[in-house]
């Protein structure tokens, strides 16, 4: 059995999470900004289907990407150099999360990004904690991702693509932007081959939480990211 959150009940310690399913910690509570930010600061995230109660997770091991370890393949390097896409920050958050909601997670039928989840993250966007990285082509949104920033920590939530390499371009620009801004780690939550291809790797929950607590203790204050802060052209000698 897992504990239920009622009213202002705090989260259990992450090490109380189940081993099967990996990381299931507790259920209940709400999706208020206060509850969500408290969860992220303790390495906990919500993930549930429309017919489920709110479920909270803290898996072990944890998939993370260190921004300076982002892996750029030869094909992605060519795409970045081509300038085929324009990348913007925080100009179409609602559209990005809506597009992500149309893309089920691997192994899951339907979306986990319910309307209630979209509304909750839109509130975090308005408060300066949630951000979108958007890939545009000829004025059309063709890819992107969204996540949460707390201090020097970024929590990646979901991405989508309507054109080849569009989501990877967004991820590459995000990683470069986070390096420039002094962010130390991107939480990727679950292990997938796609994330591993970008340089993400697993670390223990103990290591993850130690790094997370240090990174969230300092760093930039919540704010709207400048639209073109991550959109500078890539030089011809961009590293692979």
Image: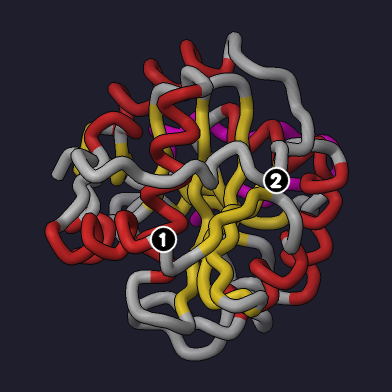
In-front residue for pair 81/56: 81
- The answer, for residue 60, to whether it is visible in the render is no
Within-10-Å neighbours for mark 2: few <14, some 14–19, many 20+:
some
**The label number, if any, that marks residue 227 in the structure image:** 2
Residue 222 x %, y %: 75, 27
- The answer, for residue 223, to whether it is visible in the render is yes
Q: Main secondary structure of the magenta part?
A: loop
Within-10-Å neighbours for mark 1: few <14, some 14–19, many 20+:
some
Q: Does 194 sit above or below residue 10?
A: below
Q: Is 12 inside the magenta-drawn segment? A: yes
Horizontal side of 237 relative to 116 (left or right) equals left
- Please tell me whether mark 1 sits on a helix, a strand or a loop: loop
Hey, which quadrant is residue 165 in on the image? bottom left
Identify the residue shown where x is 67% and y is 83%: 51
Residue 223 x %, y %: 78, 31
- Give the residue at mark 1: 83
Which mark is first along the chain, 1 or 2? 1
Identify the residue shown where x is 33% and y is 62%: 82
| Segment tinted magenta in the rendering | 1-16
- Please tell me whether mark 2 sits on a helix, a strand or a loop: loop
Q: Does 176 sit above or below residue 182?
A: below
């Amino acid at each position: 059995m897992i504990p239920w959150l009622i009213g202002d009940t705090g989260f259990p310690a992450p090490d109380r999470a189940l081993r099967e399913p990996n990381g299931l910690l507790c259920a209940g509570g709400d999706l208020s900004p206060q509850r969500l930010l408290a969860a992220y600061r303790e390495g906990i995230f919500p993930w549930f289907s429309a017919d489920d109660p709110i479920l909270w997770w803290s898996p072990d091991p944890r998939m993370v990407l260190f921004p300076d370890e982002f892996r750029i393949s030869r094909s992605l390097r060519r795409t970045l150099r081509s300038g085929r896409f324009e990348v913007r920050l925080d100009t179409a958050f609602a559209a990005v999360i809506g597009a992500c909601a149309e893309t089920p997670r691997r192994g899951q039928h339907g979306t986990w990004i319910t309307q209630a989840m979209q509304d909750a993250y839109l509130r975090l966007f308005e408060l300066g904690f949630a951000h979108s990285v958007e890939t545009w082509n000829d004025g059309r949104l063709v890819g992107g991702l969204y996540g949460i920033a707390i201090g020097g920590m970024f929590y990646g939530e979901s991405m989508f693509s309507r054109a080849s390499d569009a989501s990877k371009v967004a991820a590459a620009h995000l990683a470069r932007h986070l390096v420039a801004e002094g962010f130390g780690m991107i939480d990727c939550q679950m292990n997938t081959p796609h994330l591993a291809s970008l340089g993400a790797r697993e670390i223990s929950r103990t290591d993850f939480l130690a790094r997370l607590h240090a990174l969230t203790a300092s760093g930039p204050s919540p704010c709207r990211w400048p639209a073109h802060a991550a959109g500078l052209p890539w030089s011809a000698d961009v590293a692979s």
